[in-house]
Amino acid sequence: MLGRGGDRVRIEADPQEREALRQRFGLMELSRLAAEYVLARDVAVLANVDGSIMARGRIEADLVQACVATGTAVPESINESFTIRFERASAALDPDAEIELNAEDCDVIYFSGDQIDMGEAVAETLSLTMKPYPRAHDADRVLREVGVLKEEDVGPFAKLRELTKKN
């Protein structure tokens, strides 16, 4: 039974789960994914039987993504805290309704029945925590070597800069 606080739980993705997530998120490699968390009823709704459940914890992962500019490997280590609120799905819930969030709001995942899927919640947290546009540290050099110009080299002032260098 959930109360104000619970036991600390640790889950870790096995090789098959990591491979499935690697493919799902288009990663080059996912060598480690683990999370440690505590589940508890939201204190604000403890009196409500259908209240939300809070998961607070930390996600850890080692992965490799492809550089958005060159396709080369960009390793990343993730060690981030997370807070997720699980709320019961309601028949009155409008999936198209706009919700305003502020910086203090946490991720919300809706569930039905009597179980929540922390593995899926951790996978979704991983996807939100990864760098959205990974770029290799030497991407600019590699791009120059193959003839890709920088924006300032082809922008409207490139010709003016060229003329001032001649004088």
Image (cartoon, helix red, strand yellow):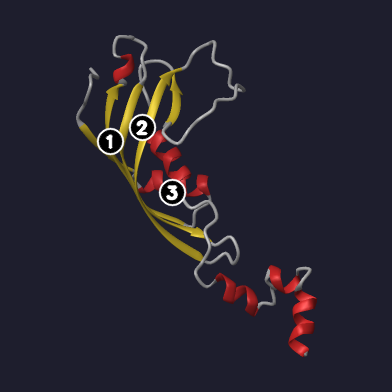
Q: Which image quarter holds the N terminus?
A: top left
The residue indicated by pointer 3 is 19
The foreground one among 63 and 16 is 63
**Residue 111 x, y percent position in the rendering:** 43, 21
The residue indicated by pointer 1 is 37
| Pointer 2 local density, CA inside 10 Å: few below 14, some 14–19, many at least 20 | some
On the question of residue 156 being in view, the answer is yes
Label 1–label 2 contact, CB within 8 A: yes
**Residue 35 x, y percent position in the rendering:** 31, 41
C-alpha distance separating marks 3 and 2: 18 Å
The residue indicated by pointer 2 is 118
**19 shown above or below 47:** below
**What residue is rendered at 36% in x and 16% in y?**
114
- N-terminal label among 3 and 2: 3
Label 3–label 1 contact, CB within 8 A: no
C-alpha distance separating marks 1 and 2: 9 Å
**What residue is rendered at 45% in x and 22% in y?**
110
Q: Which image quarter holds the C terminus?
A: bottom right
Kind of residue sitting beneath label 3: Glu
